[in-house]
Amino acid sequence: MHPRTALFIPMLSLLVGMVLPAGAVAQPPAGASATRPAPAPVQIPPGPPAVRPPIEYQSALDHYRKFDASAGMEDWHAVNARVQQRGGWREYARESARANAAVGERK
């Protein structure tokens, strides 16, 4: 017998021995129904209807800033170097947050 076959047969028997009992446990007992009865519906006590706050809509485009093509284009190497000198994207995020807070205060 080949050495791999000698190892394969015990491993296969071990696997089959583990899988078959698991399938037997998953079966309902003899004579039992495989389906469960539906749960009783939840009864809501009568009373005044819930008070809901008014819905306020705010568009995601309220603070949209249109692209300004007249500003011109710059070399991206130079722009990336300038961003790095100023503190990276975190500094620009802080500037944007301050600008958005100022817009919110004006409303």
Image: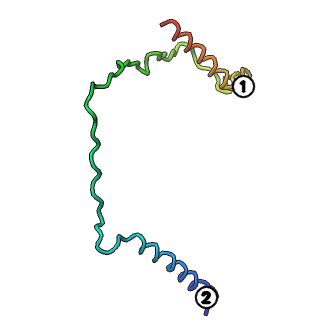
Q: Image check: 19 left or right of 57?
A: right
In the image, 67 versus 103, the foreground residue is: 103
Residue nearest the viewer, comparing 66 with 47: 47
Q: Residue at x 62, y 22 (%)?
A: 93
Residue that protrudes farthest toward the right in the picture: 85
Kindly identify which residue carries mark 1: 84
Q: Nearer the viewer, residue 81 or 13?
A: 13
Q: Identify the image quadrant of residue 44.
A: top left
Residue under numbered circle 2: 6
Label 1 environment density (alpha carbons within 10 Å; few <14, some 14–19, many ≥20):
few
- Cα distance, mark 2 to mark 1? 64 Å
> Type of residue at label 2?
Ala
Give how far across and how far down residue 58 sits, in percent.
41, 18
Tell me if residue 39 comes above or below residue 9 in the rendering. Answer: above
- Which quadrant does the N terminus fall into? bottom right
Picture residue at 51% right of the left edge, 15% below the top: 68
Sequence-first tag of 2 and 1:
2
Residue placed furthest toward the bottom: 1
**How far from the left and from the top, in percent, is residue 103?**
52, 10
Residue 82: percent from left, percent from top: 70, 21
* Nearer mark to the viewer, of 2 and 1: 2
Secondary structure at numbered mark 1: helix
Q: Residue shown at 64%/19% (left/top)?
A: 94
Q: Amino acid at mark 1?
A: Gln
* Snapshot quadrant of residue 78: top right
Q: Secondary structure at mark 2?
A: helix
Along the viewing direction, whichever of 32 and 101 lies nearer the viewer: 32
